[in-house]
Image (cartoon, rainbow, N blue to C red):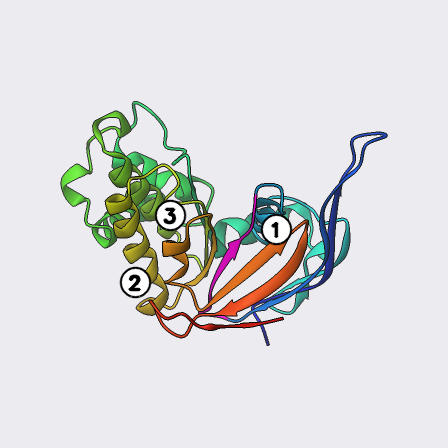
Amino acid sequence: MALIEIKKLGKIYDGGENETRALSGVDLMIERGDFVAVMGPSGSGKSTLLHILGFLDDYTSGQYLFDGQEVSKYSPEEVARLRNQKFGFVFQAFNLLPRTSVLENIKMPLVYSDVPEKEWNNLARQAIEAVSLTHRAFHEPSQLSGGEKQRVAIARALVNNPEVIFADEPTGNLDSKSGKAVMDIIWQLNTQQKKTVILITHETYTTEHARRVIHLLDGEIESVQLVANRRGEGNFEK
């Protein structure tokens, strides 16, 4: 059974007389441990798809099954619990709290979890060790480079030991060297910790880490590229 399965998924944003169709009839299956990159021009529906898969937005039509269960049947409380326990999010803008230490930033998801507070420090330290930033634990975001900020964001996404990592343009604000370092961490999460990764990206080099590259155009899947290996050319299927 696929971890994520969507069937004929559609999303319309209602702007009164001017409706915007962001997704139309999207079919996709993602297995546990998969690494899927989603590409497409601005307005193609990439972020909308990620937000729906991450329980951050609702869909208008079709089906979304997570772990075999229809998502529309979950209560708001169940959605919030699953989003906190099962998903970790990494965004282009980092979204770190200013004037708050790296360690405290990483703890934030635990505030909304069922994890006892006495365990928060230990879990946060494990997460920060996973991204090799222990020496920055008590620095504030303003004292970090862009690459370090994104590594903090990854550690924060990891602290609840999620099943799925959603990464929305995680290298978009980084230079190429920092971007490659961040992608190496995400790659290791997938290959070593078996995290399922769903990556939104404009940059071709980041897709070299994926197993499949989904190309969206005007809210529909235009093609699917199978990546032979980390730096392979792969082939195309429709």
Q: Secondary structure at mark 1?
A: helix
Q: In the rendering, at what x and y percent does residue 32 appear?
A: 49, 70
What label does residue 188 carry, if any?
2
Viewer can see residue 144: yes
* Crowding near the residue tagged with mark 2, few <14, some 14–19, many ≥20 C-alpha atoms within 10 Å: some
Which residue is tagged 3?
116
Q: Secondary structure at mark 3?
A: loop
Which residue is tagged 1?
49
Question: In the picture provided, is 5 more to the left or to the right than 201?
Answer: right
Answer whether residue 35 is magenta in the image: yes
Using the numbered discs, state the Cα–Cα distance from disc 2 to disc 1 in whole angstroms: 24 Å
Question: In the picture provided, is 31 more to the left or to the right than 158?
Answer: right
Q: In the rendering, at what x and y percent does residue 95 appear?
A: 41, 33
Q: Nearer the viewer, residue 124 or 228?
A: 228
Quarter of the figure with residue 156: top left
Q: Nearer the viewer, residue 223 or 157?
A: 223
Using the numbered discs, state the Cα–Cα distance from disc 2 to disc 3 in whole angstroms: 28 Å
Viewer can see residue 123: no
Looking at the rendered image, the disc whose residue lies closer to the viewer, 2 or 3, is 2
Tell me the kind of residue under disc 1: Leu
N-terminal of the two: label 2 or label 1? 1
The quarter of the picture where the C terminus appears is: bottom right
Q: Look at the image and give the residue range highlighted in magenta.
A: 32-41
